[in-house]
Amino acid sequence: MLDFSNTEIAFSHKSDADLRNADCLFRAIKQPFIVKCGKGLAQLALGINFPVAWAVKPTLFKQFVGGETLKDCTRSMEQLQKFNVKSILDYSAEGGQSEQDIRYSYEETLRSIDFARNNPTIAYTVFKPSAMVTDELLAKASEKPETLTAAEAKEFARFRKRFMSLCERAYKNDVRILVDAEDYCFQDAIDRLTEEAMRLFNSKRAIVFATLQMYRHDRMPYLQKIWDDSRKYNYIAGIKFVRGAYMEAERARASEMGYPDPICKDKQATDDNYNAGLAFVVDHIDCMELFSGTHNEYSNLYLAELMAKKGIQPNDTRIFFAQLYGMSDNISFNLANAGYCVAKYVPYAPVKKVLPYLIRRAEENTSMAGQTGRELRMIERELDRRKQKRSAVANPS
């Protein structure tokens, strides 16, 4: 019986000092004013090239990032592996739109795929398509591809080549690769390329995984479309589910541009959509593989129940549960302890480049209903449990 309230298992990889630091951090994140001020100061520091590593590294960076380089991540990944938790390498530099930034993101992703080859601590690699092309071109190619100029079409062809070469490198290295989902205005072009890559590289097993943001109300029909396509072209579809990350921006853009809101009407509709997706893939697990990326306790329990009903063993590597590094350890480590396949997203990048990611993590924890409170309650419960245990040892009855 899975028990996500077992803090001894959840934090078995954390020292008392680690837990106290996390407690202080989540208390700060819980305050919107502190996060807002921190964001402003961080953006100012980036703008004037003021060094911030001294403040960020012992706090946000330590909690949510594996290291500055692939080599730096090794210790974090080996520590996770001790508890049967795999890693997902994620180069998390954000915001660069120059040709130099694009080229570096592409080359670093190739390095991460090579680093993952025959590495037992790593379950997947991942890439963000918008890091490989400018936002303007990706939006145009997605929403109005027929209006691309000759120069734009040539540049998009370069992007497609980068996209496919990453998937091909993953295929040659026998490393699964997750194609991140993006803003609604980018997604159609990404979907088309991901489908093409799955046809090319998923003939024997799922190497390339499409990401479906289930807060979009059109994702269940799209999931059916992928399944139909996989049957037509005889490949194993890789499906990654997340709830979604851009709701407010999506609704604002839909209103501004005059197209229908792509987001589910409320949280319950999103939850229902997510869980329906899980059930669909489990029902078709003979020709699909599943990556469930969620911090929602019910969805994780529901997936475990679906597996049990279908007679799928917890350690079946066609199904992975996943959470972010530094969050929801009560879910990740209790699932892993029960024998399920679990992975943590392990972001890495130099402090300056990963700072936008860290700001987003802090903002999401502040706005995510109940998430920060749950993290704090779990940490406090474990610290209290350890204190009582030490007291019992020091003062036996």
Image (cartoon, rainbow, N blue to C red):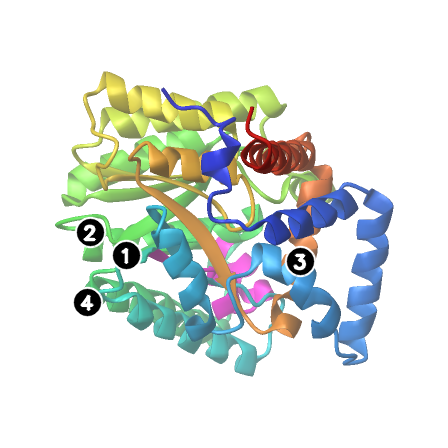
- Relative image position of residue 16 (x, y in whole percent): 60, 48
| Residue annotated with mark 3 | 60
Question: Label 2 is placed on what type of residue?
Answer: Asn
| Residue annotated with mark 2 | 202
- Relative image position of residue 262 (x, y in whole percent): 58, 35
The reply to whether residue 334 is in sight is yes
Residue nearest the viewer, comparing 67 with 172: 67
- Separation of disc 3 and disc 1 at Cα? 35 Å
Question: Label 3 is placed on what type of residue?
Answer: Leu
| Tags 3 and 4 touching, CB below 8 Å | no
Which residue is outermost to the top? 309
Specify the quadrant that holds the C terminus. top right
Q: Which residue lies at the image location 29% right of the left edge and 35% below the top edge?
A: 339
For mark 3, give the secondary structure.
Answer: helix
**Nearer the observer, disc 3 or disc 4?**
3
How packed mark 2 is, by other alpha carbons closer than 10 Å (few <14, some 14-19, many 20 or more), is many
Examine the rendered structure and indicate whether residue 25 appears above or below residue 219: below
| Tags 1 and 2 touching, CB below 8 Å | yes
| Residue annotated with mark 1 | 197
Mark with earlier residue (1, 4): 4
Residue nearest the viewer, comparing 16 with 201: 16
Residue 172: which disc?
A: 4
Q: Quadrant of residue 200?
A: bottom left
The reply to whether residue 257 is in sight is no
- Separation of disc 2 and disc 3 at Cα? 37 Å
- Separation of disc 1 and disc 4 at Cα? 13 Å
Mark with earlier residue (1, 2): 1
Mark with earlier residue (2, 3): 3
In the image, the segment drawn in magenta is 124-142
How packed mark 4 is, by other alpha carbons closer than 10 Å (few <14, some 14-19, many 20 or more), is some
Q: Is residue 148 left or right of residue 223?
A: right
